[in-house]
Image (cartoon, rainbow, N blue to C red):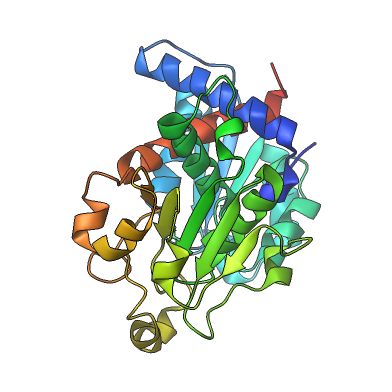
Amino acid sequence: MKHYLKFSDFTLDEYEYLFKRTALIKNKFKSYERHQPLVDRTLAMIFEKASTRTRVSFEAGMYQLGGSVVHLTTGDSQLGRSEPIEDSARVISRMVDLVMIRTYGQDKINNFAAHSRVPVINGLTNEFHPCQILADLFTFIEHRGDPSNPLACLRGKIVSWVGDGNNMANTWLQAAELLGFTVHISTPRGYEVDQSIAGLTSSHSFKVFDDPRQACKGSDLVTTDVWTSMGYEAENETRRIAFNDWCVGPEMMAMAHPQALFMHCLPAHRGEEVAAEVIDGPQSVVWDEAENRLHVQKALMEYLLLGSL
Ligand code: CP
Ligand code: NVA
């Protein structure tokens, strides 16, 4: 049994398979062709933080695959009334085939997985957001590569990360280490990535820049995220001041390769981490990126439950 708790849980071969499978599943979806390998399977989705994309993509995705879903939140379950996570994992995993969790610390999802009888998927933790990076990479492959040889277009590329050294940044770093691209990262002082939290084996796959414009130089993909992630709302005002120079605007995009794409996992705040003319401009692929959550996660759920087909 496999879990998907962080990007480095899968090998290169597994990613090659997943991206090829995603292309097939997406094609079927676009041509209204049924693809229902998960009939009678149930996914439990546990949300301890808010969500739009993750909820809709997992829920719609599981129904499209022929299965069904159970939606739980902290407020409407015993999870919010201090039932131990180990007990919740033991019970829920006796009743469903697959569990997706969005929570706070990675230790919580690790603990759940350790006591689960079924595969567990990370739908975002404070440390990682692997399903989002799966969608981002597939989006890059669709726009700049060849889905029949999906990993080739990623090798040697530069991805610029402008903003917080958060769960998205950590996951980009893990992906770069495995897939052979480099992340140019610029964060305000005090918001740097922590190599040990990101779970990197070396520092070869990223370079740190004080100036966000320099981080965008020659980039193939510029990406950012909110200044304040869920769970850090008390720091909102301090962050607003610290991140003032880390807004991706046209001048940063002009430093990048002319063919560079712009991505944002969403939700976005126009005028904070990104200028409206960038996120709504011609280099932005944020709507494809959001849609691809559906397709990559269908491939992921199918793989975790049925293996490679
Ligand atoms: N990108 C993402 O995970 O969005 P939601 O918070 O809406 O799920
Ligand atoms: N870094 C953001 C991502 C939201 C999808 C957060 O954790 O809130």
Q: Where is residue 150 in the image (x, y as percent from the top left)?
A: 57, 28
Residue 171 left/right relative to 63: right
Q: Where is residue 131 in the image (x, y as percent from the top left)?
A: 55, 45
Query: Which residue is located at x 70 percent, y 62 percent?
Result: 85
Q: How many labels, in total?
A: 0
Residue 71 left/right relative to 273: right
Q: Quadrant of residue 207?
A: bottom right
Query: Which residue is located at x 72 percent, y 65 percent?
Result: 203
Q: Position of residue 141 (x, y in %)?
A: 49, 33
Query: Which residue is located at x 71 percent, y 60 percent?
Result: 204
Q: Viewer-proximal residue, 151 or 29?
A: 151
In this view, 180 is above or below 104: above
Q: Where is residue 17 in the image (x, y as percent from the top left)?
A: 66, 25
Which quarter shows the C terminus?
A: top right
Residue 115 left/right relative to 220: right
Q: Viewer-proximal residue, 172 or 59?
A: 172
Which quarter shows the N terminus?
A: top right
Q: Quadrant of residue 228?
A: bottom left
In this view, 300 is above or below 215: above
Q: Viewer-proximal residue, 5 or 166?
A: 166
